[in-house]
Amino acid sequence: MSPSWVRASAPAKINLHLGVGPVRPDGFHPLATVYQAIGLLDVVTVSPASAWSVTVAGDDRLALSDVPTDDSNIVVRAAQSLAEHAGVEGAVSIQIEKGIPVAGGMAGGSADAAATLVACDALWQLATPREELLELAAGLGSDVPFALVGGTAIGTGRGEVVVPAMVRGEYWWVVASSSEGLSTPEVYGEFDVLADGGGLGDPDIPDELMAALRAHDLEKLVLALHNDLEPAALRLRPSLSDVLAAGVEESALGALLSGSGPSCLFLCSGREHAEQVAYGLRTADPLSLHSLGRVAVARGPVGGARVDRVG
Ligand code: ATP
């Protein structure tokens, strides 16, 4: 008997290194990135329906109103691409519960797409080979394959070519989201202005970062964290510098912008330390950190998109 609904979850991503090369003729930027999936999750529930529909729920501080509930939502494209691939007819209703900041530089939409792919695969009892799901994922967006794979991984191409990396131990992060999202294309646009058509070589993955991850050496890891998009995002949203500085003042080992921002990441030495830094940020003077949204603690690496329940 086929299930009447399937629930799946997928994690937010952070980039421990985000190297960006000069824009290509097709408009994309070549990336060399080290992804880590962390324990901030979106949950997607799919069930058969007579028409396609999307509903969105979650924490009010995550800018939920920016998530479309029509066919432009990436979850509809994800379900339809799998349906087309497998020759399935009929629509599904898709409920999204957001735990990942919207337009926060943490690939929340990509996580929803990955969760939808595995949920619909189970709903329609397709058992689609992993390679085929990864190909469909890459067609949906650069970060979707990583949301399927999870863990810690190197991403190249536009970020869609994902190879798992050797990493020891767990890493504790504080994630400070912003009350207002930042548009990824706008941040890349600003990046192009700053690069001014020159000075950029092909991006690559720094050996020091990979060595620090293999050894679980937090001191070396802090020194190796890097995001090429940070100057562009800070130009567009200067108040983020105050958030980054506040986390370090609260004793975080290091601070980094997540992807294209505006979420800020703080590396901590363990869970208790992360709780302490998060508490400090939550109780900081709201006037000095007026753009601060939800402050959460998350562990990485965690696994990729997976089916949680079938009913
Ligand atoms: P990117 O993945 O481009 O780095 P991001 O992580 O900053 O983006 P997302 O939360 O993925 O941000 O959303 C980017 C935009 O995509 C949103 O502003 C929204 O308009 C659109 N969008 C479409 N579907 C979704 C979805 N399921 N969840 C969130 N945003 C979505």
Image (spheres, rainbow, N blue to C red):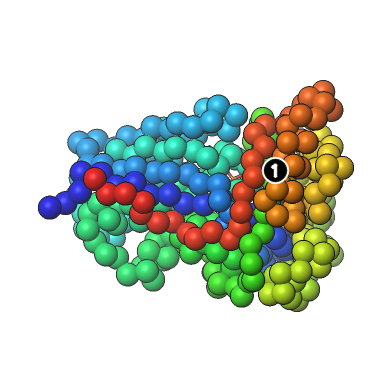
Q: Is residue 161 above or below residue 13?
A: below
Residue 270 locus on image (x, y percent): 70, 55
Does residue 128 appear to the left or right of 66 in the view shown?
A: left
Q: Quadrant of residue 143?
A: bottom right
| Residue at x 39%, y 43% (from the top left corner) | 44
Residue 210: tell me if it is visible.
no
Q: Is residue 1 above or below residue 61?
A: below
Residue 14 locus on image (x, y percent): 64, 54
Of residue 14 and residue 294, the one placed in the foreground of this image is 294
Residue 293 locus on image (x, y percent): 67, 32
Residue on which the image places disc 1: 275
Give the class, few, some or many, for how many residues have Cα within 10 Å of label 1's Cα (few <14, many ≥20).
some
Does residue 177 appear to the left or right of 68 in the view shown?
A: right
Q: What residue occupies the far top of the structure in this picture?
A: 287
Residue 32: tell me if it is visible.
yes
Of residue 111 and residue 20, the one placed in the foreground of this image is 111
| Residue at x 67%, y 37% (from the top left corner) | 295
Hey, what amino acid is under mark 1? Glu
| Residue at x 55%, y 72% (from the top left corner) | 164
Does residue 151 appear to the left or right of 237 in the view shown?
A: left
